[in-house]
Amino acid sequence: MPQKQNYASKAEQGMLKKPPSPPLSECFPTVAGIVIKMTYYRKRANPILMLRTVNILPVDEACFNMNCMIKGCSDGGFDLTSVVSKMVMSRKGAAKGKLSCLGHGDVLDPAEHASVEYEIGVRYKRLR
């Protein structure tokens, strides 16, 4: 039970730090939806930490900063904002890439930080 309370308080603190983002429809009016598929990796015997799919609809927040999933990492994460912005500007439908976490932590050796491979798909509204 204390672990759940600790997690809840950390999640609440994280939410308080982050200012709310405008909805996707305000930031990118031509976009009908975005799907982000990520594979989180760590430097261990079992390298795949997690598979994650995030669906972003026009009513959802246009927040593309994903948290690092390594326990003890602070101020880390993966910011896909520039990738998504460039895709929308050029009306690209898909992109793939890799990012590394630049966070830090008392417990973590810099070599222990996570990395992520991502695939982003953007669906656009039909032009009339």
Image: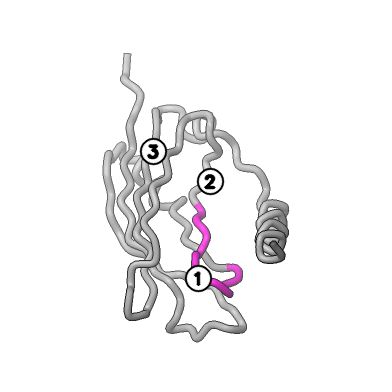
Which residue is denoted by mark 3 in the rendering? 34
Q: Does 92 sit left or right of 59 as displayed?
A: left
| Dot 3 or dot 1, earlier in sequence | 3
1 and 2 marks in contact (CB < 8 Å): no
Q: Position of residue 98 (x, y in %)?
A: 33, 63
SS at circle 2: loop
Task: Identify the magenta region.
Answer: 65-75
| Dot 1 or dot 2, earlier in sequence | 2
Q: Position of residue 47 (x, y in %)?
A: 33, 73
Identity of the amino acid at label 2?
A: Cys
Residue 12, placed above or below residue 75: above
Which residue of the protein is positioned furthest toward the front in this rendering? Answer: 1
Residue shown at the point (49%, 72%) measured from the top left: 102
Q: Position of residue 111 (x, y in %)?
A: 43, 84
- Foreground: disc 1 or disc 2: 1
Q: Position of residue 26 (x, y in %)?
A: 54, 30
Identity of the amino acid at label 3?
A: Ile
Which residue is denoted by mark 2 in the rendering? 63
2 and 3 marks in contact (CB < 8 Å): no
Q: Residue 70 got which mark? A: 1
SS at circle 1: loop
